[in-house]
Image (spheres, helix red, strand yellow):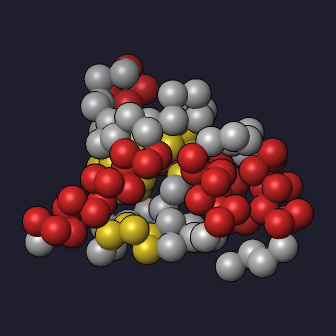
Amino acid sequence: MLAHQADVWFYVTTLEIEGTELADLYFRHGAMPVRGWYELIEIDQVEQVTTYAINELGVPVGYLALTGVVGQGIVLYNRSSQAVFDVEFGQFDLLLKGELAPIATTFSGFLRWCRDRDQDD
């Protein structure tokens, strides 16, 4: 985990997520497993994984990768709406067209969604 707040602040501003629930999580806790195979990547890896997702997978610009490529997809965060999407391979066109529903409309909603799935398992 990045221990130094200045390092976290650098990445938060670089990623343009200041004042969001996502930024708050990284400031308070760093990356963490949030459910089974969902493990948030460290904030210093978000830009690199996002660039890969955009260039190689066709993820639309404006989304951040919250996880690496896991199983058959990736978890993405929309910077403007703060919604979180669990996108399987082959669904990137639906995401681009706005036809893929988010699993949560906020980052805290995503954390609740993960908690609820864990309770269901």
Can residue 58 be seen here? The reply is no
Q: Residue furthest right?
A: 6
Dividing the picture into quadrants, the one containing residue 116 is bottom left
Up the image or down, 120 lies above or below 84; here it is: below
Quadrant, the N terminus: bottom right
Q: Position of residue 60 (x, y in %)?
A: 52, 33
Q: If the image is split into quadrants, where does the C terminus sit? A: bottom left
Q: Residue furthest left?
A: 120
Say which residue appears at 32% left-offset and 69% top-offset.
35
Percent of width and height locating residue 26 = 64, 62
Q: Residue at x 73, y 41 (%)?
A: 18
Residue 33 horizontal/vertical position (percent): 43, 74
User: Position of 56 compared to 19: left or right?
Assistant: left
**At 65% from the left edge and 51% from the top edge, which residue is drawn?**
23
Would residue 58 be found to the left or right of residue 45 on screen? Answer: left
In percent of width and height, residue 21 lies at 57, 47
Q: Which image quarter: residue 93?
A: top left
Q: Is residue 58 left or right of residue 8?
A: left
Q: Is residue 5 above or below residue 78?
A: below
Q: Residue at x 38, y 20 (%)?
A: 97
Nearer to me, 5 or 59: 5
Q: Is residue 56 above or below residue 45?
A: above
Q: Which one is nearer the viewer's eye here, 28 or 99?
A: 28
Q: Is residue 101 among what the camera can see?
A: yes
15 vs 108, left or right, is right
Marker count (numbered):
0
Of residues 37 and 56, the one drawn nearer to the viewer in this rendering = 37
